Amino acid sequence: MYSALLDTCVLWPSLQRDFLLSLAVEGLYRPLWSDAILEELEEHEALKLQKHGSPTEDSEEKARSLTQQMRTAFPDAEVRGWEPFEGTYGLPDPDDEHVVAAAHLAGAGAIVTANFKDFPPSLIPANIEVISAQEFALNTVALSPTGALAALGHISARYGRNGPPRSVEDLLTVLAERYGMNDAVDLLIAARK
């Protein structure tokens, strides 16, 4: 199965994370991350929740719960043993070395990120492509539009259980307008007809 390492920056936006991980639940790819990525996600998620008015302790607990849910849902996603490879790629930002090290060690086909300047193609192992969440979503939806629609249906159902409902149409609008996944959304709309 195709594996993709998801960088923190593509996991931080809530609906984008939910969509990408729901595609994995449908068996369209295998997600990967390192413990460093989850620690960074937890930190940023807690800050986001605090910014939206949640008390610090509650924010930290919700962020911990998020990363624990990810670990539970995808027990084989966390790449271990990448540390010896950190610092061997010569990336512009040494703090991003763990991303490439984990992707390389796990045999990922892609690193999904928004941070292209710190992952120059000449420094990335030849078997790994660095792509945006938008391109990755398009490629993954193209593999199975019906699987991707099922993922959206599950997201919509979770919204109804955990808060105000959101229809699949609402989700498609947000994915296009907020996350720029227009091409993937166009495929999904065509598949619904």
Image: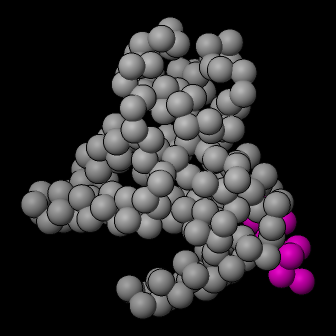
Nearest the camera: 134 or 35? 35
Nearest the camera: 178 or 108? 108
Q: Main secondary structure of the magenta part?
A: helix
Q: Is residue 188 magenta?
A: yes
Nearest the camera: 179 or 31? 31
Instruction: Tell me residue 31's x, y (percent).
Output: 56, 52
Asked if residue 64 is positioned above or below residue 165 in the image, the reply reads above
Q: Is residue 94 visible?
A: yes
Nearest the camera: 177 or 91? 91
In the picture, measured across the screen, residue 46 lies left or right of residue 186, that is: left
Q: Which stretch did the figure color magenta?
A: 184-193
Residue at image x 79%, y 76%?
146
Residue at image x 73%, y 46%?
135
Instruction: Tell me residue 108's x, y (percent).
Output: 62, 38
Residue at image x 89%, y 83%?
193
Instruction: Tell me residue 176's x, y (percent).
Output: 68, 61
Asked if residue 51 is positioned above or below residue 32 in the image, the reply reads below
Residue at image x 70%, y 49%?
2
Q: Is residue 48 magenta?
A: no
Q: Find residue 16 and report its image quarter.
A: bottom right
Q: Is residue 14 visible?
A: no
Instruction: Tell me residue 90's x, y (percent).
Output: 50, 9
